[in-house]
Image: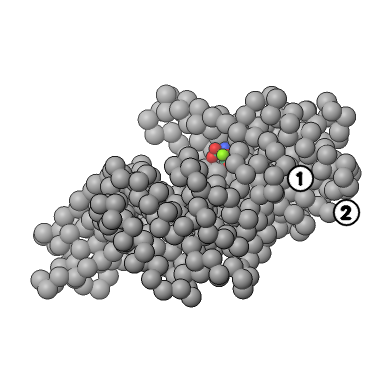
């Protein structure tokens, strides 16, 4: 008997009909002789609505209370899903994150899982239940409700799969899998049959938000293979797994676009040990996620550091930086801009093939698209472009690597 964790995202449980669809699929899986744990998100739009509600009563809602509020979204779905399963003659029990034994640290709205004690989940499974677990939430050891960051239900599913040693983890969503590019932007994008954790991670952190990146990191760390599939059909999805030898034959697995980026430049920073640390410690203490970092040192003993971040974090970053650089040097200046986007080409095959950067830059150049910043890793080349050319940029890069026709495995 196999143990299967299935996660259904917001659109897959977006209305009562869809919840019944999930219930039906889950029961089929159980009746085929499996033990089934279902992790669900809030119904689509619910989390956003709750956030909006909070803003209507407070400009800066307490993060502790945000978590209490947001956790209700998933709690609604677990109850409805369990009811739907029961109504179809199945046996189901819902669990909040806390009831499923998910314990986190106390960083509200972005909590990290510190341990999982799945005794209750195992007991319910042994007793023949489908166990319906609320995604995205946990409790601190002191019993406070926490949430795991937007998209955190994926993490719940993968972490639970690891904790109960599930044989299969399936992430159901509203697309057939991971594509070579977002098909809404690039019409001839294709579904990728198999992708390594590392590539998936780079794609996710570069804007291909099929899944929350922290979940992929977690899966990589604990070696949990998982499949991204469509909840509305039976099509095979994308298998995300450890890298194998033949996966290197594909040079670029996909290209992604990260919109709504912003850039901060700290100019005329005295070129002395400790200054970069001072800047980034301030950013770190504010729990802000930053992306590309570029530093240049001029001949005048002054450095210039630029980094990118989400435009929603721009205001807060600016505030903490102004505080952090106070007294560092007279000419220090903080410049902030938004209206930029990041285009990335990702593939582990890059390690063993040359000329990849040149191909990408030429495609952009030929299309008249200016490159603002460049960053590379072993398996990724990313550029910052003006948001006005973002869609054209991803199309020409996809075309340049012939992702519409080249073999994908
Ligand atoms: N409901 C949460 C969100 O919208 C978590 C999730 O869907 O995974 O971010
Ligand atoms: Mg979601």
Q: Earlier in the sequence, mark 1 or mark 2?
A: 2
57 and 245: which one is in front?
Answer: 245
2 and 237: which one is in front?
Answer: 237
Viewer-nearest of discs 1 and 2:
2
Asked whether, in this view, residue 55 is left or right of residue 97, the answer is left
Looking at the image, which residue sits at the far front?
405
User: Circle 1 is placed at which residue position?
Assistant: 37
User: Circle 2 is placed at which residue position?
Assistant: 1
- The x and y percentages for residue 136 are 60, 43
Q: Is residue 80 above or below residue 123?
A: above
- Image quarter in which the C terminus is found: bottom right
Give the residue at x 40% y 49%: 395
- The x and y percentages for residue 223 are 66, 64
Q: Is residue 375 above or below residue 174?
A: below
Give the residue at x 24% y 62%: 305
* SS label for mark 2: loop
* SS label for mark 1: strand
Assess disc 1: are there few (<14), some (14-19) or many (≥20) residues with their C-alpha within 10 Å of its C-alpha: many
140 and 349: which one is in front?
Answer: 349
């Amino acid at each position: 008997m196999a143990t299967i964790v299935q996660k259904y995202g917001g659109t897959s449980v977006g209305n009562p009909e869809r919840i019944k669809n999930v219930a039906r699929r889950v029961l089929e899986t159980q009746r085929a002789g499996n033990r089934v744990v279902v992790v669900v998100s809030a119904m689509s739009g619910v989390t956003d609505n709750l956030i909006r509600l909070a803003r209507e009563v407070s400009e800066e809602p307490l993060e502790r209370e945000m978590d209490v509020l947001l956790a209700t979204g998933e709690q609604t779905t677990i109850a409805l899903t369990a009811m739907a399963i029961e109504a179809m003659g199945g046996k189901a029990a819902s669990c909040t994150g806390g009831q499923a034994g998910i314990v986190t640290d106390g960083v509200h709205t972005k909590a990290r899982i510190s341990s999982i004690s799945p005794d209750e989940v195992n007991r319910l499974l042994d007793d023949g239940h489908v166990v319906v677990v609320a995604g995205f939430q946990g409790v601190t050891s002191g019993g406070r409700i926490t949430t795991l960051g937007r998209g955190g239900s994926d993490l719940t599913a993968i972490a639970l799969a690891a904790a109960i040693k599930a044989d299969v983890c399936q992430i159901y969503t509203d697309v057939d899998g991971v594509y070579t590019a977002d098909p809404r932007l690039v019409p001839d994008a294709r579904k990728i049959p198999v992708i390594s954790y590392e590539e998936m991670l780079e794609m996710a952190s570069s804007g291909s938000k099929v899944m929350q990146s922290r979940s992929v990191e977690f899966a990589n760390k604990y070696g949990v293979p998982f499949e991204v599939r469509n909840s509305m059909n039976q099509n095979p999805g994308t298998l995300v797994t450890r890298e194998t030898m033949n996966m290197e034959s594909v040079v670029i697995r996909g290209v992604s676009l990260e919109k709504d980026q912003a850039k901060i430049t700290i100019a005329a920073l005295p070129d002395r040990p400790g200054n970069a640390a001072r800047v980034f410690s301030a950013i770190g203490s504010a729990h802000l996620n930053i992306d590309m970092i570029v530093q240049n040192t001029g001949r005048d003993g002054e450095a210039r550091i630029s980094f990118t971040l989400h435009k929603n974090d721009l205001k807060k970053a600016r505030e903490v930086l102004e505080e952090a650089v106070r007294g560092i040097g007279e000419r220090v200046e903080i410049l902030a801009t938004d209206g930029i986007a990041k285009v990335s080409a990702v593939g582990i095959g890059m390690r063993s093939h040359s000329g990849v950067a040149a191909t990408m830059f030429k495609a952009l150049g030929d299309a008249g698209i200016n490159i603002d910043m460049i960053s590379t890793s072993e398996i990724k080349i990313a550029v910052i472009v003006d948001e006005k050319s973002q869609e054209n940029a991803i199309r020409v890069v996809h075309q340049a690597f012939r992702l519409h026709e080249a073999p994908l495995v």
